[in-house]
Amino acid sequence: MDALARSLADTGLPHPLLVDAARTAIADGSPEGVEERARRHAHAAARALLQPVVNATGVLLHTNLGRAPLAVTADAAYTNLELDLSSGRRGSRHAHAAALLARLCGAEDAIVVNNGASAVLLVLAALATGRGAAVSRGELVEIGGGFRVPEVMEQSGAKLVEVGTTNRTRLADFASAAENPANDTALALKVHQSNYRIVGFTEHVTMAELASLGVPAVADIGSGLVDAACPWLADGPPAWLAGEPAARQSLADGAALVTFSGDKLFGGPQAGIIAGRADLVQRCAHHPLARALRPGSLVLNALQQVTLAYMRRDGEAIEFWRMASLTTSELESRANAVTTEAGAGEVAEMASVPGGGTLPGVEIDSYGVVLDGDHTASLRAGTPPIIARVSESRTWLDLRTVAPADDHHVIAALKAIG
Ligand SMILES: *Cc1c(COP(=O)(O)O)cnc(C)c1O
């Protein structure tokens, strides 16, 4: 077994993983073909490692592909994570990205936690444990990946106070819930419906209305749009963004706190941001859960880079926004170049989607390459793996979500398919 494992050293995997591959191959059957089987197992182990893939699905925030694409390079180095360089004394890890995020959103203060779900959990635990949190029945949603608002509330120790009906909730419903002493309402929570819409005979309470209630109004906007005016985009907000709640406007409308994900429309690393009133942010920061949910310097560094790009109004530096803003003519000429060079596939119009549980039903016109038949398995088997979409027995490669530097990988894969 050891000799068999050593014979696979060229795969680059460490010895224990090669021993596993060898052991599985030996257990699999006869001595005949054992080397070949062991090599297959070793390759499978290498394929299972976390690695870059080419996203040709056209889904900008693909949860299976890590949501927002992110470039992070950091040398092995110490940082001033919790050191105040001016005084030389202990500082706070919230002094970097979180402080910049507060500035960016127009908030008094902010903290960063592990993801959007932990942001909501921490807010509820810090501000409403053992007390009531009022939520519209139309917003008791499941976002995906098992994030269910009522279950997160239960875990936080807050008591769910359901308000209104599935399709219609008015300010008066919130007011009567808040006036009922039995509810002991600590806050009102407005949850962005994110991945679905209720249409027809509907009514909902705006943040400005909710803010008039007399208890802190918390907006879980989820998607992480910083500013509805999109000052980081030369042409302003794209039409497909219409109606998406934004951090800056929610706070301006009176939200005491907003919570959102770092890796959806914000275009950064997996993180959760809590921004708003300084006293409430501090209560979150001092809750014991904050220690359990805190991010490390890798995440804070990536978040800081993205936040600075927003402050410079440099949407081109934020990969998600660069891809989201590509024009159809740019994409069409890339698709032409790819099919010409590959000598395979046809240029086709297609539709990208924002994805990541945001903006359901929204499509963004795009261009890419289409092939007859289902080639997704062989595309996925390449290095780097290329992830494409199949519909109507054709394989669709949307170039909006492919970095231009990866076009040559697409060309090579198309040539191989022929
Ligand atoms: C996505 C989302 C969450 C969960 O955020 P994660 O970063 O996935 O943990 C919570 N609330 C809303 C409204 C969301 O859209």
Image (tube, grey):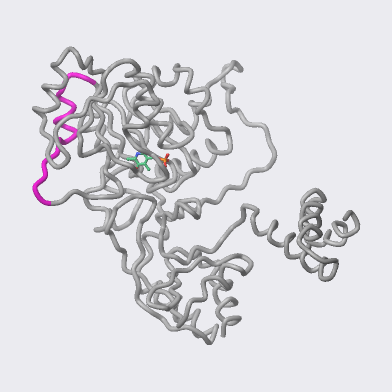
Q: Quadrant location of the N terminus?
A: bottom right
Q: 72 and 234: which one is in front?
A: 72
Q: Is residue 319 left or right of residue 24?
A: left
Q: Quadrant of residue 395?
A: bottom left
Q: Quadrant location of the C terminus?
A: bottom right
Q: Quadrant of residue 190?
A: top left
| Label total for image | 0
Residue 7 at x, y percent in the picture: 87, 62
Q: Residue furthest front?
A: 30
Compared to 46, does 281 lie above or below?
above
Compared to 271, does 318 lie above or below?
below
Q: Name the residue: 36% across, 61% down.
A: 325
Residue 104 at x, y percent in the picture: 36, 36
Q: 362 and 28: which one is in front?
A: 28
Q: Name the residue: 42% across, 78% down.
A: 393
Q: Is residue 208 in the magenta section?
A: yes
Q: Is residue 345 left or right of residue 260?
A: right
Q: Name the residue: 58% across, 28% down.
A: 81
Residue 35 at x, y percent in the picture: 83, 66
Q: Is residue 400 in the magenta section?
A: no
Q: Residue furthest top?
A: 181
Q: Is residue 317 left or right of residue 256?
A: right
Q: Name the residue: 46% across, 38% down.
A: 271
Residue 16 at x, y percent in the picture: 80, 48
Compared to 130, does 324 lie above or below?
below
Q: Residue furthest right?
A: 3
Q: Quadrant of residue 181?
A: top left
* Ligand 1 lies in quarter: top left
Identify the magenta region: 200-215
Q: Is residue 246 left or right of residue 291?
A: left
Q: 379 and 18: which one is in front?
A: 18
